Amino acid sequence: MKLVKSLLLGSAAGLVAAAGAQAADLPTRKSAPVEYVRICDAYGAGFFYIPGTDTCLKIGGLALAEYRAYSVTFGVGAGFEGASTVFSSPGVTVPAANPGGVNGYVPDLYKAYANGFQNARSRDITGFDALGRVELDARNATAWGTLRTFIRVDSYYGSSASAATGSDTGLGIYNNAANVQLARETTVLSKAFIQFAGLTAGRAQSFYDFYADAYNWEGLRDSNSNTTLLAYTGTFGGGFSATISMEDQVERRSGYASVIGNVNNTGGVVGVNAAVGAAGANFADGISNGGSRMPDIVGNIRVDQPWGAAQVSAAVHQLNPQFYGTAVNAAPPVATTGSFPIPGYNNNEYGFAAMGGLMFNLPMLAPGDKLWFEGGFAHGGVGYNNGSNMAYFQGVDYTRDYAVGIAGSITNGNGWQRPSDVDCVYTSTHCDMSNTFHALAALKHYWTPTISQSFYIGYFGVRYSAASISPYTSTAGVANIVGMTNYDEYKGGTNLVWTPVPGFDIGAEVDYLHGVIRNRPYGLAPDILLTANGLPAWKATEDMVEGRIRVQRAF
């Protein structure tokens, strides 16, 4: 028995020893060390190192919801100045009391949005907006300074006429120029740029801009443009810097107009052009943008100090208007290829813009309080005064006239004012450049650390040449239809915001606009003819009110 037990114990010991020897011969594998996300405090809060790199990354975003309500008036489309018909199809009622048989242009009740009448009953007075934003901010320290890459993508939803970031015109069955709006969802690349050793390249805020709608939600008429650019900024110590920038001309481009006259002979209907051509003959003149030939050249000089900041900006903006003439207006050369006209005039014009701004920190009132002043002038550069280039009529993908900017400015009704202004107006062989102005002041005050209020006022003015607003007659004896109008706009507003948690805002805003048209459009029919055809009488002033509620969270 003892012999059997000894044999068993010996065998077990031998097996254990052998197994241990074999295990010792096998290669060993250790688990990879866990790399935890490390905080990067070199560039402020929120940055962390991307694992395995020396790149610091900050992820951010925003969710915004709004409800808007606004007063509306009737409106007329952009084409009623330089209109395509003297009388509306199928004809115009001429009242017996029409003094001396005086006639003129009657905006069309039935035709396209471009020059039709838009009644208030068929226009939106409420609407919703929503915005979702994602941001990435990556930075590296280098021997030449910080290398930064920034990306912002915005997705919009809009459902009303002033939801310019997402809405589009919907046509009704009757009065199809009613400006009813279809909801639209649109995603845009708001910003995507690289900064390195003073260089900025990509899509960024224009270096011309200063205040750029810092506090107001409803857009003011100022300069606020996202644009694609290539710029260099030099710093000189003491807070002084200067920038020279080449910026995309297309994103500051507005439209063009003509008062030479688009003439449609209405045959037997009495009118200023009744004797021209055969009944129903159509003689059309047209204008368009030529191709971009050079970027806008933008420069600024800026100083940042504990008391605040100051900036002076200037820009050169090229215009490439094209005029398509026809035999009715014999002054421009006439050439056609089949049914497509060849431009009679190709003009290369150079406009310019200049602006100055001041910002004051007011900690003596409350921490975070700031006061802004800004004013600017542009000759042939409406986009430098007309408001945000991301707010316009046909939604954010409407890039033909990118810089009209006006749709962020309570434009659900425009009365007799042209819905958008233009860089220049053809009056003969030359395209006369417009002059535009803007001025604003804005204050932000913290009543408590979590309750703030902003106050702002703004002015916008546009002036066209005398030839743009007065009669024109071609060598064939044909007069222009309706001339341009000079315009002044005054706007004021305030918003009150509660911030219960940092980055989370609940607020309300009220805005008021007063518009003044400085001259009745030349060639517009007299009021007795307008009212006889179901239109309102011409009015030189316009007043509008807008209110909104906003909830947003930034992180």
Image (spheres, rainbow, N blue to C red):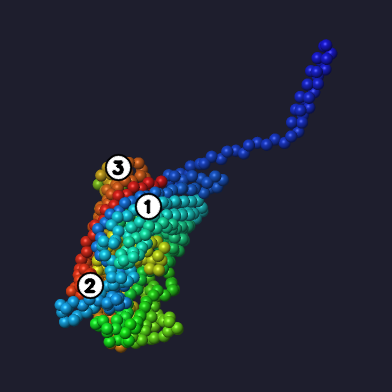
Q: Which of the two marks, 3 or 2, is nearer to us in this view? A: 2
First in sequence: mark 3 vs mark 2: 3
x, y percent for residue 228: 44, 63
Residue 517 in the image: state x and y as whole percent: 22, 69
The residue at 26%/56% (across/down) is: 70
What is the secondary structure assignment of the residue under circle 1? strand
Taking 396 as reference, is 488 left or right?
left
Question: Residue at horizontal 34%, vertical 64%?
Answer: 172
Task: Give coordinates of residue 455: x percent, y percent.
Answer: 25, 53
In the rendered structure, which amino acid carries the disc numbered 2?
A: Asn
Left or right of residue 528, residue 169 in this image: right
The label on residue 533 is: 2
Q: Residue furthest right?
A: 3
Which residue is tagged 1?
Answer: 130
Position of the N terminus by quadrant: top right
Mark 2 surroundings: few (<14), some (14-19) or many (≥20) residues within 10 A:
some
> Is 264 drawn above or below residue 201 in the view shown?
below
Where 211 sits versus 399, above or below? above
Residue drawn at point x = 33 percent, y = 46 percent: 505
Instruction: Determine the secondary structure under disc 2.
Output: loop
- Residue underneath mark 3: 449
Sequence order check, earlier mark of 1 and 2: 1
Q: Earlier in the sequence, mark 1 or mark 3?
A: 1
Q: CA distance from mark 3 to mark 2?
A: 58 Å
Which label sits on residue 390? Answer: none
